[in-house]
Image: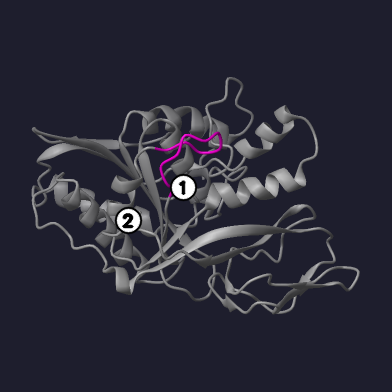
Amino acid sequence: MIPASQMHFKSVTYTGQGAGPSVIIMGATHGNETCGTQAIGRIMAEIDAGRLPIVGGSVTFVPIVNPLAYAQNTRSGERNLNRNLFPKAEPRDFEDRIANWLCPLLARHDVLLDLHSFNAAHGEPFVMVGPVDNAGPLEPFAHMHAERALARRLGVRRFVTGWMAAYGGGVQRRVRGSKEELETVLRYGVGTTEYMRSTGGYALTLECGQHLDPRAPEVAHTAIMNTLAFLKIIDGPEPEPVPFDDMEALQMVVVHDKLDAGDRFTRQWASFDPVAEGEQIGTRADGTPVVAEFAGRILFPDANAGPNQEWYYLTRPNPQFGRE
């Protein structure tokens, strides 16, 4: 492996002759999540061979966002790129140097599709979607309808909203210091999609399946093709939205922190496992049971979390998704 200091960053842009939006599609934001990289390579080969003409707007592909993590086949290089994603005047690690290249690139585009996969042994693909339109201080946004219309055309049926609100609620509970300290910790929740929305665009994170599932690259490929067709970057029939009756939409409501290294789950939870109201999820180090305050699904359980870090999220159904 070449030294990190000698690694370079790569993006490829195709521009059509017609009008249209500028779209950026990324893989390997986390280096061991390669389904997007595989799908992007396949589609770029089709474009380069003349079999998939770009007719309007532009599409930029970033096959490998984090080359250090990709070379190591690890989630991160020196830290998680998908947190605290901002340009840094004095970069301290490899991911800071990625951010100084990636953030201006994102800001030059209108739409982001970031392709990921997950570690859980089972589970169906899902898409992380942004907030409703709002002018609030946490995550102001003005493209809800366009973002959700695209989300319903990626080819998956499960939608998750509420990341920054749930994360921010946990931060406010955790941080008891100054306003400046609170804002610093809140910035840690900003990844690729949150940064893209902060620049005036809209963005989706698609979790295409388990890391090694051979179907995950196909999920990514379908999502890319549907995105390009829906936004008129390529010619082709407009993909149909997933019907409302077939959708499962979930709202992230609350995050619970691990308070002590001795806190333990009652079993090996996986994202989207259902939980009943009052069901025991874990046990605190002092023996206090941790129970679900409402019926829903667990999300992002992390048995390896450290003290005062996110342990798990709870979601509940979001029947209004797509109908706002």
How many numbered marks, from 0 up? Answer: 2
Quadrant of res 109: top left
Q: Please give the residue where the numbered disc 2 appears in the rendered image.
A: 151
- Name the residue at 57% across, 25% down: 88
Q: Which residue is mark 1?
A: 29
**Can you tell which quarter of the image residue 256 is in?**
bottom right
Q: Position of residue 44 (x, y in %)?
A: 22, 48
Q: Nearer the viewer, residue 139 or 34?
A: 139
Mark 1, Cα crowd under 10 Å, few <14 / some 14-19 / many 20+, is many
Which sits in the foreground, 190 or 100? Answer: 190
Q: Are marks 2 and 1 in contact (CB under 8 Å)?
A: no
Does label 2 or label 1 sit earlier along the sequence?
1
| Separation of residues labelled 2 and 1 (CA atoms) | 19 Å
Q: Secondary structure at mark 2?
A: helix
Residue 237: x and y in percent read 9, 58
Residue at x-position 56% and y-position 65%:
315
Q: Which residues are magenta?
A: 130-141
Residue 280 lies within the magenta run: no
Asked whether 315 or 221 is in front, the reply is 315
> Horizontally, is 215 left or right of 128 in the view?
left
Identify the secondary structure beneath mark 1.
loop
Q: Which mark is residue 141?
A: none
Kind of residue at disc 2: Ala
Kindly identify the residue that appears in the image at 36 percent across and 41 percent down: 202
The percent coordinates of residue 211 (x first, y second) are: 46, 65
On screen, residue 232 versus residue 136, left or right, reads left
**Residue 155, how many percent across, how many down?**
28, 64
The image's colouring method is one colour
